[in-house]
Image (tube, rainbow, N blue to C red):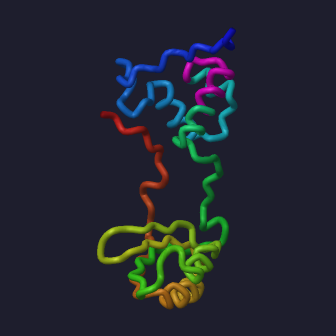
Amino acid sequence: MGDLVAVPKETRSSRPAANESSSGFDAVDRQLLELVQTEGRLKLSELGRRVRLSPAAVTERLRRLETSGAITGYGARVDPRRLGYGIEAFIRVNPHGGYNLKHPRTLELMERPEITEVHHVVGEDCWIVKVAVADTVHLEEILEEVSALGRTTTSIVLTSPVRQKPLPPVMR
């Protein structure tokens, strides 16, 4: 006799339900994503209360969002000024031939704690590097290292009226 074979569950329809977007996020997912982005320290019981689900259901939803890659991590947002970094700046870099984001010298530079973001972009420049520095002397030190990789253009941040607002899934 043959072995018993488990019948797989029916696969979910490829069409989203009426309350879902084409990206597969329903209204509860959207609420959870907004809440964890704006109030990341909420307890599971409070998240559940706000979205009208049990803590167990919220845990399962969050696990699914993490597994899918929609949630990539959790962390605290800090104020650079309170940590001694009085200046934030964007450095646009047009690298010399041979330098790319995987070059050992570039990788070494990106390890510096002052470099908070690096973006590979299309346009006149290839990279946009965001830095937080204590003062202009500190900025000059960073610029010397970055300038060794290519031509740079620097913009100092005066204010940031919009900072890390929640990003909802695309509605289509």
Which span of residues is magenta-colored? 51-62
Left or right, residue 48 beside residue 149? right
Q: Quadrant of the N terminus?
A: top right
Q: Position of residue 46 (x, y in %)?
A: 65, 26
Residue drawn at 50 percent across, 70 percent down:
130
Q: Say if the magenta span includes residue 53.
A: yes
Count of marks placed on residues: 0
Pick the residue in front: 76 or 100.
Answer: 100
In which quarter of the view is residue 17 placed? top left
Please say if 126 is above or below 10: below
Please say if 36 is above or below 17: below
Q: Quadrant of the C terminus?
A: top left
Pick the residue in front: 129 or 66.
Answer: 66
Left or right, residue 10 beside residue 78? left
Pick the residue in front: 102 or 52.
Answer: 102
In which quarter of the view is residue 69 placed? top right
Q: Position of residue 57 (x, y in %)?
A: 63, 21
Q: Position of residue 51 (x, y in %)?
A: 55, 22
Q: Position of residue 37 (x, y in %)?
A: 55, 42
Please say if 30 is above or below 125: above
Residue drawn at 35 percent across, 18 percent down:
18
The kind of secondary structure the magenta stretch mainly shows is: helix
Q: Say if the magenta span includes residue 162.
A: no
Residue drawn at 51 percent across, 86 percent down:
143
Residue drawn at 50 percent across, 25 percent down:
28
In which quarter of the view is residue 161 placed? bottom left
